[in-house]
Amino acid sequence: MMNPNESNKKNLDFELNLLPVFDVLSACICFLLMTAVWVQVSSMDVQQALGGQSIAETKNPPSIWAYMNKNGQLTLTLKDAKGVTGMPKELAIGGRDGSIAWNKLSNYVKHLQAKAPQVQTALIMPNESSQYDDIIRLMDQFRSGGVKNIGISPL
Amino acid sequence: MLRNSPLANQNFQSPLSNQSALKSSRAKMKKTLMFSLSLTSLIDAFSILVIYLLMSFGTGEEVPLGKGVELPAAVKTDVMQQGLVVRITKNQYFVADKEVSVASLTKALLENRPKKKEEQNLIIQADRKLDYKAISPVLQAGSHAGFEKYKLAVVPEGAI
C-alpha cells in the first residue's frame, strides 16, 4: 500500500518550464530596443495671427516686444500694458562680446512675472544675423517667466 | 512538516561545502561538475528591462531627425504633434525630405500641406547654429501657404 505522505510529495513537486518565458522576454526586449526613441524631439509652439480684423477692431493684449540687435543687445519694450507699475517701458540689456546677457534677462523676466503677470504675450524680432539657438533660448526664458503666447517676426 | 513541503527535495547545502581542498575523491569531483543556475534574478532583470522600455515609449508624435541638423535645447517644451516637416541645413531646404529652393518654398508647402486641419502644423527643424536670415524665408512661405501654427523642433534640456 502506498504511503499517503509519498503521494503528497509527488503532487507538490512540479517543474516550471522557463524556456518559453525566456523566449517571450527576449523577443520583447529586442523589439523594444529596436523601436525605442533615445532622443525625444519636442517643440516650441509659435503662433502667427492672420490679419482678418482691422486694427480698430483688434484688442491688443499687454505684450512685451524683444528686439534682438546685432551686437547682442536686447531691447525690451512693454506695449499696451496699462496699469503696470514698477516696470520700465523700455529697457536695453547690453550684450557681452556679441552674445546676450542671459542673467540680466532672467532677472528682468522674474521681475516682470512678479509685477505684471497679465503680460502673457511676447513678440520676438530678431535681426538677420541672430543665431537660432539664441532665439530659442530667449523664447524659453519668456516661457519660464509665464509668457504663454510667443510670436516671431519674419525679416 | 518539511517532508510534505515542496522544499523537501531542495539542496540546503552551501555551495561552498564541496569546495574543500581536503576532500579529493572521485565522487566529489562529479558533484562539483553539476551546478545549478539561479534563473530568478535573470528573469527579474529581464522583467525590469521590459517594464522600463515599455514606460519610455513616448506619447507624442515621432518626427524623424534629419542628418546634419543639431537641434537647439530648451526647458519649457511642448509635445510634438503631426505636421509638415521643413528641414533647414546650411543653404539647403527640405520639405517632406525633398530638397527645394528658397524661391519654390511656398509652392512646395502648398503641395504638401496636410488635409486634416489638426495636422496643419509647420514643423521647422533647423540647425542651432544657423542665422535667422536662413529661417525667416520658411516662416514667410508658411504664412503664404496658410499655415497658422509653427512648431520649432527642439531637444528637451535633460535629454542631451
Image: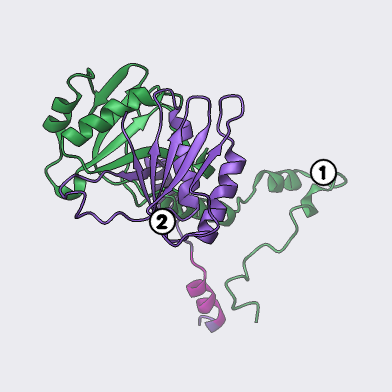
Residue carrying label 1: B24
Q: Is residue A72 left or right of residue B69?
A: right
- Our reading of the magenta stretch's main secondary structure is helix
Comparing B107 with B46, the one in front is B107
Specify the colour of chain B.
Answer: green
Chain under disc 2: A
Comparing A123 with B132, the one in front is A123
The type of colouring in the image is: by chain
Question: Does the magenta segment cover residue A8?
Answer: yes
Q: Residue A81's spot in the image, x, y percent? A: 41, 56
Residue carrying label 2: A81
Q: Is residue A28 left or right of residue B144?
A: right
Identified by mark 2, the residue type is Ala
Whether label 2 touches label 1, CB < 8 Å:
no
Instruction: Indicate whether B18 appears above or below A128.
Output: below
Q: Chain coloured purple: which letter?
A: A
Q: Residue B154's spot in the image, x, y percent? A: 42, 38
Identified by mark 1, the residue type is Ser
Q: Please provide the residue range marked out in magenta.
A: A5-14
Comparing B137 with B107, the one in front is B137
